[in-house]
Image (tube, rainbow, N blue to C red):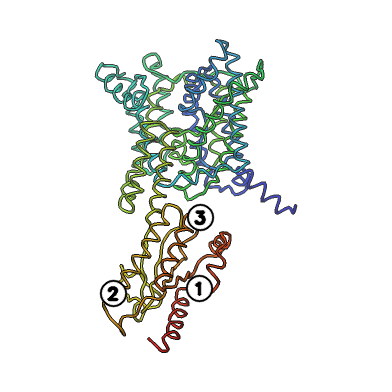
Amino acid sequence: MPIGGFRGVALSLIPGLNTALHYQRAWLVPDLRAGIALSFLLIPAGMGYAEASGLPAYTGLYATVVPLLIYAVFGPSRILVLGPDSALAPIIAASILPLALGNTERAIALAGLLGLMVGLTLLSAGVLRLGFDTDLLSKPIRVGYLNAVALLVIISQIPKLFGFSIEAPGPIQGIGAIVQGAAAGSIGVVAMLLGLASLAVIVGLRFLLGGRVPGVLIAVVASIVVTAIFSLQNVLPVVGAMPQGLPAPALGGLVWGDVVSLIAPALGIALIAFADTGVLSRTLAARRGDSVNGSQEMAGLGLANIGGGFFGGFPISASTSRTPVAEQAGARSQLTNVVGALIIVIFMLVAPGVTGYLPSATLGAVVIVAAASLVDVSGVSRLWRIDKTDALLSIAAFLSVFLVGVLQGILVAIGLSLVAFVLRAWRPYRAELGRIPGMRGYHDRSRHPDADRVPGIVIVRFDAPLFFANGGIFDDYVRSVVRRAERESEAAGRPIGTPIHTVILAAEPITDIDTTAIDELLELDEYLASRGVSLVLAEMKGPVKDQLQAFGLGDRFSPERFAPTVGAAVDTASGEFRDDIGGAI
């Protein structure tokens, strides 16, 4: 392989290398700043979700550091942040704890095995290029999804902001629990003051200075200093100190039976992880003017899970709370993830106790501001003005994700998108075309009342592929236009009125035709022939002609029944009719 070709393959397989080769100096400070700010969120999130998964807190840091470094090299998104996720934690716990039987070391090994299996599943799917399903994630779905995720994240962080905690199975119950907790006096005044002050610093600096000063970093550092000086760690919830030690393999004591037991959970987690990651990655890429390959995203996520599982972690996915923090802090490239991961490692080795002074309320403020940046109400209103169907799809995606869950909500929204597509193709736009004096071409008579029918000729257009759902509508429409034209011709009387002798189908919009629609086309052709009318197919695409040939209709629709353009079909039909009647019309 030529050197240039090898280099191109390497850059496509290793996006991080491509970023490094084209790295811009102006990105360095924003990436460093974002990485520092991100690290203070990665630590508590990783530790908390590890405990929610039934594992020691330090495994959450291993499941953060290793995947971040691997994804920075092999992941296609420049600012996507991976790590332990709340949607995966219950499934992980339900999968490994019954098998661990109270043995912590075995639970860690099973979680690592589960991560490896999830990673191998995703990597295999990526290699097989099964990431095409991200093409089903239309803009309305992405807008609705992000709005729902933002609201879910904000609701989950409000209790932290006010210094108390809640347990609720869903967002509606969570809102109720927040109201009940506040009414019962559960609010921690000190925590609330620090949380609101942090919120004010982040929002205020962004509003006043346009993001030139890292408000997130200032709020985090200031809250740590205040907590340490006044010993507030004893009177408000804090993140807690980190453990010491680096990620290391922890897969001892496993047997083949464990692999069999974890197959179903691994497949389910892989599906949820990619659904969540795929939507977030593609949405962020669209907002930044980039593009992301779904299969490459799947492979990058798979490699990150393999690395995390091997080095003492557990299954992970994209984070809808940490990614916005990186974006809002100014992240420009994968270096942000590398910086965040290395800072965690440094703290684990040098100063593991520093996070013992970080108030949970401050982290709640950071996440709330970041999640709020995902909200796009104007996007929904814009969709409503442009296309109400798309707006309703966006609202449906929002309600599904918010009320049912991320994976289920995405699947519901995709299903609704397919239904909407079928409905649009079922009853597409269709038009009779006519000629406007002094204007080239043939134009929609319903939109141009001055467009006249060519004497003796009906020109129709059907703006969709022909398939089982709309073949009958196509047939009925053409027949109705022909009958109307015949009535108008008879009413006009000759020589002004000319009997209809040709129907020309402007077939350029018809990109496909199935067997059911073929039958409808044949019935239409027979109906027209019984009335002495010829059917001509103009501008039909080659692949559709090939389909007619494949269905054995080459003799029925011979070459003279096709025309390269509508104009050519009109000229031919007009000339033949003049020959038939022995003179001009």
Q: CA distance from mark 3 to mark 1?
A: 23 Å
In depth, the one of 333 and 224 nearer the eye is: 333
Type of residue at label 3?
Thr
> With 453 as the anchor, is 529 left or right in this view?
right
- Give whichever of discs 3 and 1 has the lower sequence position: 3
Residue 515's mark?
Answer: 3
Assess whether mark 2 and mark 1 are in contact (beta carbons under 8 angstroms). Answer: no
Up the image or down, 67 lies above or below 183; here it is below
Quadrant in which residue 177 is drawn: top left
- Check disc 2 and report the residue beneath it: 488
- Check disc 1 and report the residue beneath it: 563
> With 312 as the anchor, is 164 left or right in this view?
left
- Give whichever of discs 1 and 2 has the lower sequence position: 2
- Give whichever of discs 3 and 2 has the lower sequence position: 2
Q: CA distance from mark 1 to mark 2?
A: 27 Å
Q: Residue at x 56, y 61 (%)?
A: 543
In depth, the one of 496 and 280 nearer the eye is: 496
At mark 3, the secondary structure is helix
Other residues around mark 3 within 10 Å, as few (<14) / some (14–19) / many (≥20): some
Residue 440: percent from left, percent from top: 40, 78
Other residues around mark 2 within 10 Å, as few (<14) / some (14–19) / many (≥20): some
Quadrant in which residue 20 is drawn: top right
Quadrant occupied by the C terminus: bottom left
Type of residue at label 1?
Ala
